Amino acid sequence: MIRMLALMGLLFSFVYGKKIKYDRRTIKILLVTTIVSAFLFLTGVVCMLAEVEGAVVIALLGLYVGGGLFLFAGINLLFGFCYIRRLKAYGYEIPYKKEDYGDDLRNVPHVNGKVRPEIKNVGRRVLSFFYAVVFLLANVWNVHYIVRWHLFIGDTAILLMFIMLLFDSFWGISAFRLYRQGNMQRYRDDVEIDDSRKERTPVENGIVSGIIFLCVMVLIKTLVIQFGENVFRSRAEHDQIHLETISITIGNVTMGGVLDRTSDSYMRMREGCYISDWGRPDDAFSREVAESLGISDYSEINEKFHTSDGNPRIYVKISDEGVYVRMDNPLRLDHGKQYSYEVEYLCY
């Protein structure tokens, strides 16, 4: 069975050969395309910045078509130059048109007899080190994120951190893979004819992939921060509304029905107290307020608030004008909309 698979692999290699990735003609086409698309892109930028009248189509064409084509052609031109350089390093004659050789690298002659140069893999080691450093810095950032944002959004921060850890593992895995590919006995360059060794990732591919993933990583981490801020502000708005609910509820209980103004809970609210420190209601007034709030124990108020630093400290004071309620220990972001965490329901 193993011999049959090996024979099939050899037959596949014989039929399809080893394709030539780039030739001189392709490099010329890519070079011209890069220059033309760069000019088109710059024309679009100038038209947009100068606000040239009637040039909206040209600006859009230059920005999107020219910009996209420049990026595609420029990256492939970089890959092509590096591929041609490797062909020279291995002593190949640089093909002008790969079809002249049946698009098979094995048919390309060596001009100086060199078939395997001495390769120090310095670029690969540097690239592997760069990936490892990014992996380390990304996880330092993740630790900073969970330390700061777990305080604000709780378990949501843990979920987001695990998602980022999963994404950031790309850097560690890639660094290890690039380092291993420096082994000349197990890996080969893409211009070597040796099916017994695995093909290593070209350094230029690693550079471009690294730049792209670095931009994606920065974007993801920025979006994670923005998402956390939105979650926190939504919770802060909820807490502000709930303070208003408490104020209105106590005001309605105070104004409605027969009120025993000598009850202990009412007198404490007249003096000002923290109802978040209370336990089960022990008189008619506190029971009616608790029932109106939908709680059986005032300690349940802790579960209603999400943006307090520790258990919420809810202060209530009934005056002749109305009911004043505030939370004394709110968490606050250092920017954006800030809530007062205090309300007064005028009911008299």
Image (cartoon, helix red, strand yellow):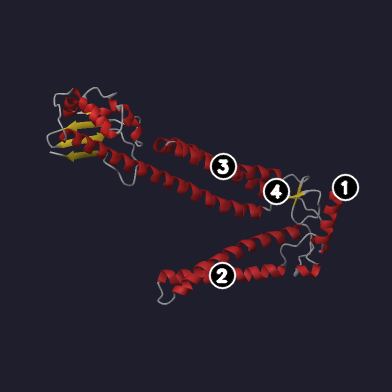
Residue kind at label 4, given as amino acid type: Asn
**Residue 326 in the image: x percent, y percent?**
25, 35
The residue pinned by badge 1 equals 3
- At horizontal 50% and vertical 67% (from top left) the residue drawn is 63
In whole angstroms, how far apart are the C-alphas of marks 1 and 4? 34 Å
The residue pinned by badge 4 equals 121
Instruction: Judge depth for marks 4 and 3 and give the one in front.
Output: 3
Instruction: Judge depth for marks 2 and 3 and give the one in front.
Output: 3
| Residue sitting at the far bottom | 54
Circles 2 and 4 in contact, beta carbons < 8 Å: no
Instruction: Judge depth for marks 2 and 4 and give the one in front.
Output: 2
Residue kind at label 2, given as amino acid type: Ser
- At horizontal 45% and vertical 39% (from top left) the residue drawn is 156
Judge by depth and name the residue closer to the eye, 202 or 309.
309
Residue kind at label 1, given as amino acid type: Arg
Q: Is residue 137 left or right of residue 85?
A: left
**Residue 291 in the image: x percent, y percent?**
27, 31
Task: Give above or below for 30 relative to 9.
Answer: below
| Residue sitting at the far front | 257
Decide if residue 129 is in sight here: yes
Circles 4 and 3 in contact, beta carbons < 8 Å: no
Q: Earlier in the sequence, mark 4 or mark 3?
A: 4
**Which SS class for mark 3?**
helix
Residue kind at label 3, given as amino acid type: Leu
Instruction: Judge depth for marks 1 and 3 and give the one in front.
Output: 1
Which disc number belongs to residue 37?
Answer: 2
**Residue 208 in the image: x percent, y percent?**
60, 55
**Which SS class for mark 4?**
loop
- At horizontal 76% and vertical 65% (from top left) the residue drawn is 94
In whole angstroms, how far apart are the C-alphas of marks 4 and 3? 29 Å
Q: Label 2: few (<14), some or many (≥20) within 10 Å?
A: many
